[in-house]
Image (spheres, grey):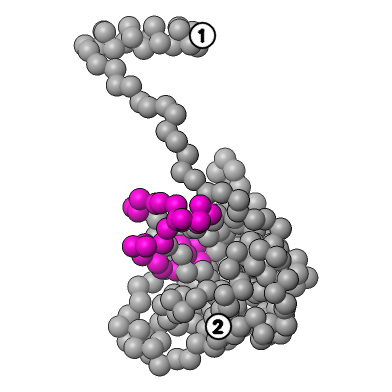
Amino acid sequence: MDIIVCVKHVPDTAEAELKIDASGKAVDKAGLVYDINEWDDYALEEAVRIKEKQGGTVTAITIGAEDSDSTLRKCLARGADKAIRLTDPKFAGSDSYATAKILYSVIKNMHYDLILAGLQAGDDGATAVGPILAEMLGIPHATMVKKLELATGTAKVNRELEGGLEEQIEVKLPALLSVSTGINEPRYVSIMGIRKAMQKEIKIMTLADTGLTEADVGEQGSWIRIEKLYVPPAEKQAEPIRGTPDEIAAKIVDLLRSRGLI
């Protein structure tokens, strides 16, 4: 079972105070800590578990600058066999469509039985690269995957729906699956794994290696362009209600009545 995992090197913004850079179109990256995208982390773990059960290979692929190598090294340390970084200044500004084109240009020439990707990226939350890539490759796809069982030539997939519902579908392989967090428990990277990963080669490919042109990537090759990025202003603030329990209850009733809710 040969598996390709699409991963992304993203900033950890959970506890960071984000600021907009001078261009007004991007987040100021100074001081931000980068790591593998959370959803991709689960996709990688699922790929490695499948390889451990059925054999085969796992190839991690990303689009990014040289600092993205740290994410690829983590993939190698966790059990990936190969790593590919697609890097070129002309890739900057690529939306989900252009990103999928870049990945497609390389993956179409690779052998694979399964492609795994995270449901979304922590920086843009677009959730679109996986399905677009699958359509370009002409293979079945499923999103929001929280359980995966492989059989001969098929995959039985549980998809998470709204309201706590799930649906179970069967797709023919090869296929692309976008996985949700919680599908597994990603393992810790061992010291031995890190040492071995440092010895492995990361294949570097540029625009010239993809067969695409400048018009296919970046803002020129995108359907969506960012015109302005800003932090929404706080229009309302919480107002604490103080007093005795009876006074608080009376104030809440008055507030609800004033707004026509009772």
Placement of 93 over or under 107, stated as above or below: above
Q: Amino acid at mark 2?
A: Ile
Which stretch did the figure color magenta? 14-42
**Badges 2 and 1: C-beta atoms under 8 Å apart?**
no
* Identity of the residue drawn at 49% across and 82% down: 80
Query: Chief secondary structure of the magenta span?
Result: loop
Residue 127, visible in the rendered structure: yes
* Identity of the residue drawn at 35% across and 77% down: 189
Kindly identify which residue carries mark 2. Answer: 84
Judged from this view, the residue extending furthest toward the right is: 138
Placement of 79 over or under 43, stated as above or below: below
* Identity of the residue drawn at 38% across and 88% down: 198
In the picture, residue 224 is in which quadrant? bottom right
* Identity of the residue drawn at 36% across and 12% down: 252
Disc 1: CA contacts within 10 A as few (<14), some (14-19) or many (>=20): few
Placement of 111 over or under 138, stated as above or below: below
Placement of 34 over or under 114, stated as above or below: above
Q: Amino acid at mark 1?
A: Gly
Q: Nearer the viewer, residue 71 or 24?
A: 24
Q: Is residue 189 magenta?
A: no
Distance from Cα at disc 2 to Cα at disc 1:
60 Å
- Give percent across and percent down for residue 53: 52, 80
Disc 2: CA contacts within 10 A as few (<14), some (14-19) or many (>=20): some
- Left or right: residue 257 versus residue 228 is left
Kindly identify which residue carries mark 1. Answer: 260
Q: Nearer the viewer, residue 132 or 217?
A: 217
- Give percent across and percent down for residue 150: 62, 72
Q: Nearer the viewer, residue 53 or 118?
A: 118
Element on which disc 2 rests: strand
Q: Quadrant of the N terminus?
A: bottom right
